[in-house]
Amino acid sequence: MERVRKFKPEDTKEIIGVYIDTYAQEPWKEDWHPESVRQRISDLTISPISICYVICDENGLIVGGLFGRRNIFLAAKELFIDEFFISSKHQRNGYGSKLMNFVGIELKKEGYSCLVLNTERGYPSVIFYKNNGFRIKESNIFMYKNI
Ligand SMILES: CC(C)(COP(=O)(O)OP(=O)(O)OC[C@H]1O[C@@H](n2cnc3c(N)ncnc32)[C@H](O)[C@@H]1OP(=O)(O)O)[C@@H](O)C(=O)NCCC(=O)NCCS
């Protein structure tokens, strides 16, 4: 039986492997160096406002994670999700839906009212998020500037 639990610093080594495997696959095809992932995971999990969970398989092995940050907006508490991933060989087995659903239920109990994230237009993750109740906010645009 799979289990969702809070991320612990001791999970870092295992999660680095899962992360590299996940994003090496189509359509992401990202070539992450383990040290960059270690730094990224550390950055995302170290803050007092970090909210981080992992999902494990029936043997207790980590198959994915959700790393987010609390975002207070007016009277509302939101979770901004920076990372959400399930290892390639475990995808499309319901792990992602279970993890997202669990975190939504937990945070609702703590007074959160919304989950927010960015993803790539046209990627399979968009289908997943829509199936899990996310909607596209048409009034927002994502902007950047190279410096
Ligand atoms: C997106 C992701 C988190 C979904 O987790 P998951 O455990 O595979 O999702 P679930 O098994 O709960 O749900 C599967 C459903 O999501 C959608 N979906 C997930 N991956 C898909 C894919 N590669 N192609 C098409 N649909 C996909 C489908 O609707 C699918 O249902 P189906 O298998 O009955 O068609 C996971 O596939 C993943 O980590 N992908 C790579 C990394 C990524 O895209 N992360 C999000 C970055 S913003």
Image (cartoon, rainbow, N blue to C red):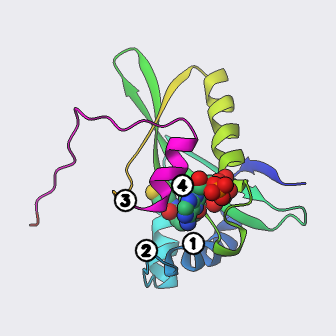
Residue 125 located within the stretch drawn in magenta: yes
Residue 85 point in image, percent of width and height: 57, 61
Q: Nearer the viewer, mark 4 or mark 1?
A: 1
Q: Nearer the viewer, mark 2 or mark 3?
A: 3
Query: Badge 2: few (under 14), some or many (20 or more) residues near its Cα, within 10 Å?
Result: few
Residue denoted by label 2 = 28
Q: Which residues are magenta?
A: 122-145
**Which image quarter: residue 22?**
bottom right
> Which is nearer the N-term, disc 2 or disc 4?
2
Mark 2 beta carbon near ligand 1 (under 8 Å): yes
Residue denoted by label 3 = 122
Q: Quadrant of the C terminus?
A: bottom left
> Which is nearer the N-term, disc 1 or disc 3?
1
Question: Cα distance, mark 3 to mark 4?
Answer: 28 Å
Q: Quadrant of the N terminus?
A: bottom right
Tell me the chief SS of the magenta region: loop
Q: Are marks 4 and 1 in contact (CB under 8 Å)?
A: no
Residue 7 point in image, percent of width and height: 68, 54
> Which is nearer the N-term, disc 2 or disc 3?
2
Q: Residue at x 74, y 60 (%)?
A: 93
Question: Cα distance, mark 2 to mark 4?
Answer: 23 Å
> Which is nearer the N-term, disc 3 or disc 4?
4
User: Which residue is outermost to the top?
Assistant: 75
Label number found at residue 19: 1
Q: SS at mark 3?
A: loop
Residue denoted by label 4 = 45
Question: Cα distance, mark 4 to mark 1?
Answer: 14 Å
Q: Nearer the viewer, mark 2 or mark 1?
A: 2
Which one is in front, 77 or 29?
29
